[in-house]
């Protein structure tokens, strides 16, 4: 399993976790295509390149597996959606 460390922001307005494509590409993570549609807070469509499964490890040591949507519509960002925050 590949490891990399980035800062993630909680996003209580999003039901899904979203990561920018550049993080996935830079770290060599595999992704799968998806027909899932993605919209930003203003309800504008965002590009959806696929889905990847990542293990998120909190500074407390707790970890969860999360399916994240990959988008090139944002750069160098990782947003954790409300559903994953509740896990």
Image (spheres, rainbow, N blue to C red):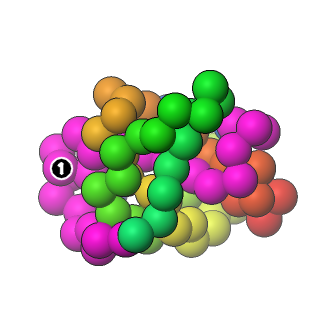
Residue drawn at the location 69% of the way across and 44% of the way down: 14
On-image quarter of the C terminus: bottom right
Image check: 57 left or right of 3? right
Residue at the front extreme? Answer: 44
Is residue 22 visible in the rendered structure shown here?
yes
The answer to whether residue 60 of the structure is visible from this angle is: no
- Magenta range: 11-34
Quadrant of the drawing holding the N terminus: bottom left
Name which residue lies at 24% across and 63% down.
Answer: 29
Q: Position of residue 2 (x, y in %)?
A: 27, 64
Q: Nearer the viewer, residue 65 or 42?
A: 42
Q: Is residue 72 left or right of residue 7?
A: left
User: In the visual, does 21 lie left or right of 81?
Assistant: left
Residue 62 falls within the magenta-colored stretch: no
Q: Residue at x 33, y 63 (%)?
A: 50
Vertical position of residue 45 compared to residue 76: above or below: below
Which image quarter: residue 47?
top left
The answer to which of 60 and 66 lies nearer the viewer is 66
Whole-percent x, y for residue 57 in the image = 57, 56
Farthest right residue in view: 86
Say whether residue 21 is left or right of residue 19. left
Which residue is disc 1 drawn over? 25
**Which secondary structure lies at badge 1?**
helix
**Quarter location, residue 66:** bottom right
């Amino acid at each position: 399993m590949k490891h990399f460390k980035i800062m993630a922001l909680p996003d209580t307005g999003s039901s899904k976790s979203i990561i920018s494509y550049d993080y996935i590409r830079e770290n060599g993570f595999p992704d799968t295509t998806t027909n899932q549609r993605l919209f930003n807070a203003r309800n504008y469509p965002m590009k959806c390149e696929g889905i990847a499964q990542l293990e998120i490890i909190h500074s407390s040591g707790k970890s969860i597996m999360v399916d994240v949507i990959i988008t090139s519509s944002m750069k160098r960002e990782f947003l954790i959606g409300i559903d994953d925050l509740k896990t």
